[in-house]
Image (cartoon, grey):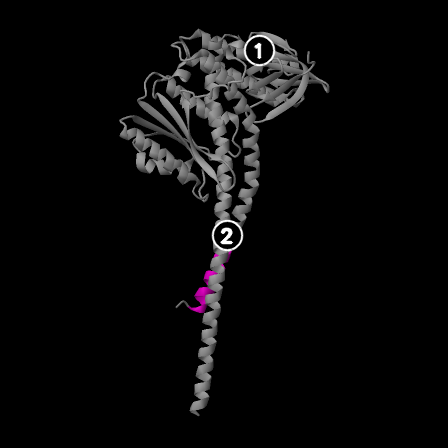
């Protein structure tokens, strides 16, 4: 069994990292998961959260705001909508993320009066965003 | 025959034109490097995205339950053309090529009895398209204020397109942009974004049904398809950005060279007429002396 797996994290604007990882913690939309080498092939969507990559160089954390991950036995690709190294997230950046989510919720409440599902989704996005802030030490206010 | 003074002013004016085009060429070269880098940085995402979507759409197949963004509305009547050009001119055939291609497509669709709606991104394309198809022009996205194209810009354009799609305003959407090949060649390209078209996975790729999906395939597809529209627009915008600077660079290079040729030609003419004037004066002096 291989003890590492090729891990790529890409956002639409650039390739953030490409390393041989021993394990990756992914904030899946239906719950966190840890993917290790020889994982069963899986495609999952992401929720806002912290992505942790363990490799020979140690642990690297990234804040992702959504997107999806493709996991196969020998490679893991995370295609994030936005991805920022955890240390680089500033208070303003985080505030903007929360504000955007709040706006999206307000807009969903307005637009989808008859689709409670869409409003719930937007509310969940905001809740996830705020929860993520607690993890990385930024307050939503 | 222009006078010596006229020639001199013309040479001066061509010289300052050459200075301007030279400067524009160098600015374009510097911007090109940046635009090319960001276009290349965005490619991994697009490639992987399309690979995953290819697998997903192959596994769902053309079933009735497939989302409309993938399977289409079932009709082929109304076409939306999104024409993406630059905000500025002086870049050779760049804008002309894109809008010519879009206009040809629009004319073809109209001849086939379809309805055509046009959205433009970038001022130059709007001017060109409005001239011939002002009845079909429905919206314009202004990019003047945006210096570096970000994913959010593509997302907002995509959101506009998607809301029109949901409102049933069109059946098929295509984007027009210029693919950046290298500095001298940019290829105007038409890409269909709704219904989405993805390359089928290669034969040696692992079977699509092999994958587990979390949540289920339908939900993932519904989540990813709108993102696919934004991704396609984003990569179109970036390719366009690099193409624009490349086209401008070679156009300005040509202009600089032309100005140089013109200066040479004018200088020769100037020298000849100067000599002619001197010869004339000599003749006058000599014939004056002989008359004495």
Q: How far apart are marks 1 and 2 (CA)?
A: 57 Å
The quarter of the picture where residue B61 lies is: top left
The single residue placed furthest to the right in the displayed view is A57
What segment is highlighted magenta in the picture? B3-15
Task: Indicate whether A44 appears above or below B261.
Answer: above
Given this view, does label 1 or label 2 mark the residue nearer the observer? Answer: 1
Q: Is residue B70 left or right of residue A36?
A: left
Q: Is residue B160 left or right of residue A50?
A: left
Q: Please, what secondary structure does the residue beneath circle 1 have?
A: loop
Mark 1 lies on residue: A41
Residue B145, given in percent of the width and then of the height, sits at 48, 34
At 62% across and 18% down in the image, what residue appears? A63
Which residue is nearer to you in this view: B226 or A128? B226
Residue B203, given in percent of the width and then of the height, sits at 51, 18
Residue B224, given in percent of the width and then of the height, sits at 49, 16
Mark 2 lies on residue: B256
């Amino acid at each position: 069994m291989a003890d590492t797996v090729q891990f790529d994290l890409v956002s639409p604007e650039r390739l953030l990292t490409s390393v041989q990882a021993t394990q990756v913690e992914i904030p899946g939309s239906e719950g966190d998961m840890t993917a290790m080498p020889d994982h069963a092939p899986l495609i999952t969507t992401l929720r806002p959260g912290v992505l942790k990559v363990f490799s020979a160089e140690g642990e690297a954390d990234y804040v992702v705001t959504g997107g999806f991950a493709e996991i196969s036995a020998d490679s893991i690709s995370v295609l994030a909508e936005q991805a920022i190294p955890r240390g680089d997230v500033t208070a303003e950046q985080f505030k903007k993320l929360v504000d955007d989510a709040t706006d999206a919720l307000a807009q969903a409440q307005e637009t989808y009066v008859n689709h409670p599902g869409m409003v719930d989704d937007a509310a969940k996005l905001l809740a996830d965003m705020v929860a993520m802030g607690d993890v990385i030490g930024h307050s939503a206010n | 025959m222009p006078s010596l003074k006229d020639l001199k002013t013309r040479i001066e004016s061509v010289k300052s034109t050459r200075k301007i085009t030279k400067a524009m060429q160098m600015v374009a070269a510097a911007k090109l490097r940046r635009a090319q880098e960001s276009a290349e940085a965005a490619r991994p995402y697009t490639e992987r995205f399309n690979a995953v979507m290819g697998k997903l759409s192959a596994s769902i197949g053309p079933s009735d339950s497939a989302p409309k963004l993938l399977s289409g509305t079932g009709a082929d009547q109304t076409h939306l053309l999104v024409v993406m050009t630059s905000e500025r001119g002086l870049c050779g055939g760049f804008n002309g090529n894109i809008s010519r291609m879009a206009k040809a497509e629009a004319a073809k669709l109209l001849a086939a009895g379809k309805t055509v709606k046009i959205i433009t991104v970038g001022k130059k394309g709007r001017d060109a398209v409005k001239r011939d198809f002002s009845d079909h022009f429905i919206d314009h996205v202004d990019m003047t204020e945006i210096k570096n194209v970000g994913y959010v810009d593509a997302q907002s354009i995509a959101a506009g397109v998607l809301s029109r799609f949901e409102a049933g305003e069109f059946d098929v959407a295509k984007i027009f942009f210029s693919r950046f090949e290298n500095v001298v060649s940019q290829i105007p390209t038409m890409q269909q974004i709704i219904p989405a078209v993805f390359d089928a996975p290669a034969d040696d790729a692992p079977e699509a049904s092999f994958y587990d999906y979390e949540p289920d395939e339908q939900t993932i597809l519904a989540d990813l398809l709108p993102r696919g529209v934004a991704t396609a627009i984003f990569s179109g915008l970036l390719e366009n950005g690099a193409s624009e600077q490349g086209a401008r660079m070679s156009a300005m290079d040509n202009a600089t060279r032309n100005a140089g040729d013109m200066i040479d030609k004018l200088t020769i003419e100037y020298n000849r007429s100067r000599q002619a004037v001197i010869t004339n004066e000599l003749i006058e002096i000599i014939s004056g002396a002989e008359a004495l």
